[in-house]
Image (cartoon, helix red, strand yellow):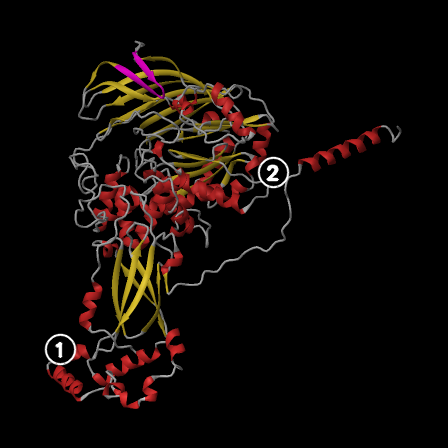
Amino acid sequence: MPIRGLAVASLAAALFVAPAVPQAAAQSTPAPAEKFSQDDKFRQLDELLPTPNDYRTASGAPGHEYWQQRADYDIDVELNDETRIVNGSQTVTYYNQSPDTLRYLWVQLDRNNFTPNSHAQLTQTRDELEKMSFRTLRRHVARETFDGGMKIDRVETPTGDELDHTIVHTMMRVDLPEPLAPGARFAFKIAWRFEMNDTRVLNSRTSSEFFEEDGNYIHQVAHWFPRMAAYTDYAGWQHKQFLGRGEFTLEFGDYDVRITVPDDHIVSATGVLANPGDVLTSEQRRRLREAETASTPMFIVTPEEAKDNERTQPGGKATWRFQAENVRDFAFATSRKFIWDAMGYDLSDRGGELVMAMSFYPNEAEPLWSTYSTHAVVHTLDVVSDFAFVYPYPTAQSVNGPTGGMEYPMICFNGPRPEDDGTYTARSKYGLISVIIHEVIHFYFPMVVNSDERQWTWMDEGITTFLQYLTEQEWEDDYPSRRGEPKDITVYMSSPNQVPIMTNSESILQFGPNAYAKPATALNVLRETVLGRELFDHALREYARRWQFKRPEPADKFRTFEDASGVDLDWFWRGWYYTTDHVDVSVDNVRKFTIDSQNPDTEKAWRRTRRDAEPATLGERRNADLPKRTHAYPALLDFYNDYDELDVTPGDLREFQEYLDGLDDEDRALYEVDRNFYLIELGNRGGLVTPVILALHFEPGPSEELRIPAEIWRRDNERVSKLYSTERELVGVTFDPHLETADVEVENNHWPRRIVESRFELYKWKRDTPNPMREAKEELERDNVSSASDTGGED
């Protein structure tokens, strides 16, 4: 039965929320707050984002004057399988499509990261040195002596004239013989060489893995040629030094690459093999054609053939020629150990073309790789082509080797293998599927949506990790995704030593959670809780469509999502990307109100019931049996000893009747409503504003769900009260019942509070105090026994 208490008028007073206690300043610039000491969590991002212009519009789309540079490469490279020396020469044709005149060009020499005096090596730190693994010490010693830097033999014009150039750590400035005007192009040549690192000592994105059993290598070759630095409308030359974490900012172009290796090697590379007749057998070419229409992966090089290759010696050299159009980078892998499988994936029904999905791996990777790798490639293309755009390239390749996971256009390097006996753990199986999914998604972001990785790791890793989660969930039921679910990031969100997502790639703390997990989770929250799937998916496709083969900045992403969804998300970007706040909403209290009927019979009876239900105090109980003076002198009792203020009087009835007579029909209808009014009081303890999702539990059931936009916090981001009315009896409230907001403390999400259950371990206490004297005595006794044994027990 509803409890009748405060009048409706008193509800208005109860709804007033007082200004909150000041909190620590947020990462973003707070609004002036002379009379209200809170940061404005809903302040627009205008002062943080660059001003829109003809190159980048306020809607987040490329402007009508958008431009970007271009660089085409013609490369000859040879890899010595025994010495691991790479020699190359290239002609670069650079197109100045900017409105600016350029007097010099900047080129990336990323291999210089592997010189003993590189900035990456010199700035390495270590907090303590109580113990160190042999592997770590071996790596430390090798980094001080190994020189895997890029040696530039010459820089010249196509006619052989030397070009002045200056090497600045991992960058090289090439001075132009005359200024390069807008719309002009300039061709120049570079000859270079370097030694690849052995993964047994130094592992990196470029590595050679040696197999002791058969004496062969797998070489994964990346960041291996001088690459043009990006020149952009927002930063000019992107010539931040390469320190290892901040990856690459590159220009699109066409590649014609000739790779010379031993003639028994199999090569996987960016692009399409242009000379199969020179390097493949007729049987391999036949299998490759058959694989185009195969429903499952087919072997192009079988495991048995790969084993035979391992035992042979090369008869000479072979040159594999690969061509790739409109890509931003080029990588390759080569080995005589490679098994090769492939299958075609036809995207013509979605406006695309046939894609050859292929995997390259040694017998040591079996049976895990032949079962899962190419299937994972095809599955990823299938899912992501729906969420973003149809995959635009003719090949998609996964290569096993020393690199755990790294991406390049059309090719990725992935590490997991089974045990030596061919068995594998669930962790290895799902680790392989997940890393392939992740790296193939990179074929879209940033290999097509060409974000600035040197500046913003999260722009490609965050969206890739998010799409990885979606792709994994379409692989099988209950796929064990590591990242994406909000509940899986709560420990990080409340941890110390954080920086905002909007932090330069080289300055990030807790790199994996910050650059991968947090932005991926933010997008999941945006999709499931803030926008809903339909609006979010439309906005994501619009962002990908606008910026494919172009270079978006963070503001372009933020603005596109708002433009395409029709929802103001500045509060979301500000909180999730510019601060280290976290979600921790507490259901602090729930108060119940009903309408005061003004009927004295009803209201005074209700008040008497509540009064009579109050427990007697300890003093009242002990004083009850004391002798009283009025017991001895009854004449002292008068009218007030029998008077009860809760008795109904004729005056009360007259006053009530006058109240009723003063109500019109509309007021009387409201008066007769028999509802309970609940004031649900919420506290924001984590600082990050969030939609409020409440499960309301009733007696009897069923429960209801109340979903409130984040704007409920716009006037007070520390505590709010929500009025909810119902004819039923509310018995409990739960915030975030589906664990969708990344709330870090679930125990304060319940009202009334739950008893927290846990377990403790019962054990027997044992003395285990070190006793050097006893140890020395025992050691002496062992020595005496040993000596007696050696002499046969004789004196």
Q: Establish if 319 lies above or below 304.
A: above
Quadrant of the drawing holding the N terminus: bottom left
Observer-nearest residue: 419 or 321? 419
Q: Quadrant of the C terminus?
A: top right
Residue occupying image coordinates x 32% and y 40%:
501
**Kind of residue indicated by mark 2:** Asp
Give x and y (percent) for residue 125.
43, 28
Name the kind of residue labelled 1 in the image: Glu
Residue picked out by circle 1: 666
Q: Between label 2 and label 1, give the one nearer the viewer.
A: 1
Residue 94 is left or right of residue 515, and the answer is left
User: Residue 626 occupies which quadrant of the picture?
Assistant: bottom left
Inter-mark Cα distance, 2 to 1: 82 Å
Quickly name the residue at label 2. Answer: 420
Q: Main secondary structure of the magenta part?
A: strand
Q: Which residues are magenta?
A: 163-175
